[in-house]
């Protein structure tokens, strides 16, 4: 009987970005300009890859498909959005909404598959150049493209059918600017569990699997590049992949955040902003990235549109190209000169310059800080292990954090103390590589553990009833294991890229330990590829984990503000305060150190900052978590009472 009373929805109403007409008009012109740029840029890419015979090979065949996709992808959403900006009627029919979702999903999934195909193409070209013609023949490329389009078609058909067989009743207001999956599920008046499972399954299969293929391809590519003896050769080979890597990061970053998270963590406002990025900005940037960073495309553009050779824009591009060519000539000449210098002097050990001046004072300071760090973190691990009341996910992660702080300060401090106290500042080549490896391992793992701890607080505060299931013991162990695995992969990449460089001359490292930027400074070879790898990997790790923390705390703050009691709000927020302090200290220094180009790297500043995050922060963390945490203080008092330090209350 209840179903008969439901009002059948025949259309949906898009909610506007703003109530003010001036804002709507401004957004209209902004989006219109971006849309026109996207159309023109992608049409130009398609035209020059068709007309110019020099671009008739697999990479540009896939790029042509990608540009065609981008035109369809952006045209499935933007025209309707532009109409809604200026029209009072912001409705879309039921069938029109289904059609829009179908084409958007169809083209989006196809793009995921094509990006994976382009990564495979780069892998074959770099790792198997002699077999490239056979492995990536015309027929093979056509089959790969056809399969990508077919997968997109079938997935879109299944997803759209699964959504629009649901009953829609009550409100038909869609808080979005196009018919996307998550906001439509919000409007359904039936159980959407199966649909959510379907979406997650599809996303894992056709977003994460292609993403994993891309990662595997680039791991093999990096391994092959590292074997190239010439610095210029490594740089040139790596540059053929950089455009694709940037596009993949932009597309997959926003896609994973939008679709691969639970329904209860869904935020309409955040997702509207994210959707603007991957529906408008990313399709506009892709052709510009592939053209401005690709010499072959720029040369083809000159050949296909010769009239541009007289324009001011092309003159600037030619000057830049000539400057690049001159730089490459200078690099080649420098390489030849170095080759004549008996293949460099092999560095067997490095000299750590340190701080200089008052080594005894430095030794005492480091000894005090390191001793307090050891005592504090060992104490935290002992308390958590001994007290059964602290056997919860939060303290499981905190115990791992203390272990990491203990390890990564121990990688640095003992050697620094030895240098300060004895004056012997030498470190062997292998010792320097080992120190960098383990420091990067523990430091990167800590970054992921801090993100996991933010997610734990989000699950505890925003979904307390599901918390025991969401953060089960098995889940916690998997999250920690994944953090360590991510740390291992990063430290392997960073150490490999750094120590495949050539080191000649005095081998002096202007630091008190073997950190990546300082060691690169001591190299006498071209560090471009290594710098790009460091910036890409560190940028991805810092930004991705930072976004997880920011999004988690965004939801936490929203939930806490809904608590009616001031005391309840204070209690809920106090469970996060210690973690927020730790995150602010750690991320502030890490971002300053590793997310900056080599050109602005300052050894003096970096050494001071390094002392802070290698010694001071690991020392402060156990005190922050103990002095601001009643449970830890209670457990500490209990253990001291057992040992006879305190008398128990009668």
Image: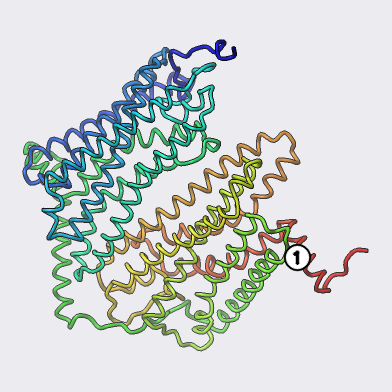
Q: Is residue 629 above or below residue 636?
A: above
**Seen from this angle, which residue lies furthest right?**
650
Residue ID at (33%, 69%): 496
Residue ID at (21%, 68%): 228
Quadrant holding the C terminus:
bottom right
Image coords of residue 370 (percent x, y):
60, 75
Image coords of residue 141 (percent x, y):
16, 44
Q: For mark 1, does the 10 Å Cα neighbourhood hold few (<14), some (14 to 19), or many (20 or more) residues?
A: many
Could you tell me which secondary element the residue under label 1 belongs to? helix
Q: Quadrant of residue 152?
A: top left
Image coords of residue 72 (percent x, y):
26, 29
Image coords of residue 263 (percent x, y):
52, 35
Count numbered badges in the picture: 1
Q: Quadrant of residue 562?
A: top right
Residue ID at (63%, 76%): 371
Residue ID at (57%, 40%): 555
Q: Is residue 278 above or below residue 516?
A: above
Q: Quadrant of residue 170?
A: top right
Scheme of colours in the image: rainbow
Residue denoted by label 1: 636
Q: Is residue 129 above or below residue 82?
A: below
Quadrant holding the N terminus:
top right
């Amino acid at each position: 009987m209840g179903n008969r009373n439901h009002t059948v929805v025949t259309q949906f109403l898009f909610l506007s970005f703003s109530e003010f007409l001036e804002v709507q008009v401004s957004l209209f012109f902004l989006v219109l300009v971006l849309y026109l740029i996207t159309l023109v840029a992608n049409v130009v890419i398609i035209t020059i890859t068709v007309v110019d015979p020099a671009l008739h090979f697999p990479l540009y065949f896939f790029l042509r498909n990608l540009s065609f996709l981008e035109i369809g992808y952006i045209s499935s959403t933007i025209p309707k959005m532009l109409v809604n900006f200026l029209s009072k009627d912001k409705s879309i029919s039921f069938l029109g909404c289904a059609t829009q979702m179908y084409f958007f999903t169809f083209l989006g999934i196809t793009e995921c598959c094509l990006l994976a195909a382009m990564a495979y193409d780069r892998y074959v070209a770099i790792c198997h150049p002699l077999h490239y013609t056979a492995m990536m023949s015309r027929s093979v490329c056509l089959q790969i493209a056809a399969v990508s389009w077919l997968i997109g078609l079938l997935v879109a058909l299944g997803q759209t059918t699964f959504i629009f067989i649901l009953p829609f009743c009550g409100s038909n207001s869609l808080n979005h600017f196009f018919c996307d999956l998550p906001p439509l599920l919000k409007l359904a008046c039936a159980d959407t569990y199966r649909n959510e499972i379907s979406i997650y399954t599809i996303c894992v299969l056709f977003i994460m699997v292609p993403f994993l293929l891309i990662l595997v391809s680039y791991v093999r590519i990096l391994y092959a590049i590292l074997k190239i003896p010439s610095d210029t050769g490594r740089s040139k080979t790596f540059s053929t992949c950089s455009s694709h890597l940037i596009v993949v990061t932009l597309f997959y970053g926003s896609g994973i955040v939008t679709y691969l998270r639970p329904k209860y963590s869904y935020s309409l406002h955040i997702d509207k902003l994210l959707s603007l990025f991957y529906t408008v900005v990313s399709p506009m940037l892709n052709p510009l990235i592939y053209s401005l960073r690709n010499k072959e495309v720029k040369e083809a553009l000159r050949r296909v549109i010769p009239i541009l050779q007289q324009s001011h824009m092309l003159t600037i591009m030619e000057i830049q190209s000539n400057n690049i060519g001159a730089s490459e000539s200078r690099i080649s000449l420098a390489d030849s000169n170095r080759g004549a210098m008996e293949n460099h002097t092999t560095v067997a050990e490095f000299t750590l310059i340190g701080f200089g001046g008052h080594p005894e004072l430095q030794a005492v300071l480091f000894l005090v800080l390191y001793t307090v760090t050891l005592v504090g973190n060992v104490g935290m691990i002992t308390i958590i292990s001994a007290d059964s009341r602290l056997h919860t996910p939060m303290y499981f992660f905190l115990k791992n954090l203390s272990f990491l702080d203990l390890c990564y300060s121990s990688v640095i401090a003992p050697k620094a103390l030895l240098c300060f106290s004895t004056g012997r500042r030498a470190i062997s080549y292998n010792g320097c590589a080992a120190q960098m490896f383990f420091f990067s391992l523990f430091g990167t793992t800590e970054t992921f553990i801090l993100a996991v701890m933010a997610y734990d607080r989000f699950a505890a505060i925003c979904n307390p009833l599901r918390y025991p299931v969401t953060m089960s013991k098995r889940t916690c162990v998997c999250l920690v294991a994944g953090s360590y695995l991510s740390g291992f992969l990063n430290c392997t990449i960073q150490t490999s890229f750094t120590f495949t460089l050539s080191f000649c001359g005095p081998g002096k490292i202007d630091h008190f330990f073997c950190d990546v930027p300082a060691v690169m400074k001591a190299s006498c070879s071209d560090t471009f590829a290594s710098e790009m790898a460091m910036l890409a990997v560190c940028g991805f790790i810092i930004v991705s984990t930072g976004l997880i923390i920011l999004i988690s705390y965004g939801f936490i703050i929203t939930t806490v503000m809904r608590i009616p009691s001031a005391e309840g709000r204070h209690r809920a927020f106090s469970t996060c305060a210690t973690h927020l302090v730790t995150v602010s200290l750690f991320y502030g220094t890490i971002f300053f150190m590793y997310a900056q180009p080599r050109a602005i790297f300052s050894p003096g500043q970096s050494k001071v900052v390094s002392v802070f995050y290698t010694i001071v922060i690991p020392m402060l963390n156990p005190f922050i978590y103990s002095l601001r945490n009643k449970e830890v203080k209670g457990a500490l008092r209990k253990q001291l009472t057992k040992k006879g330090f305190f008398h128990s209350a009668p």
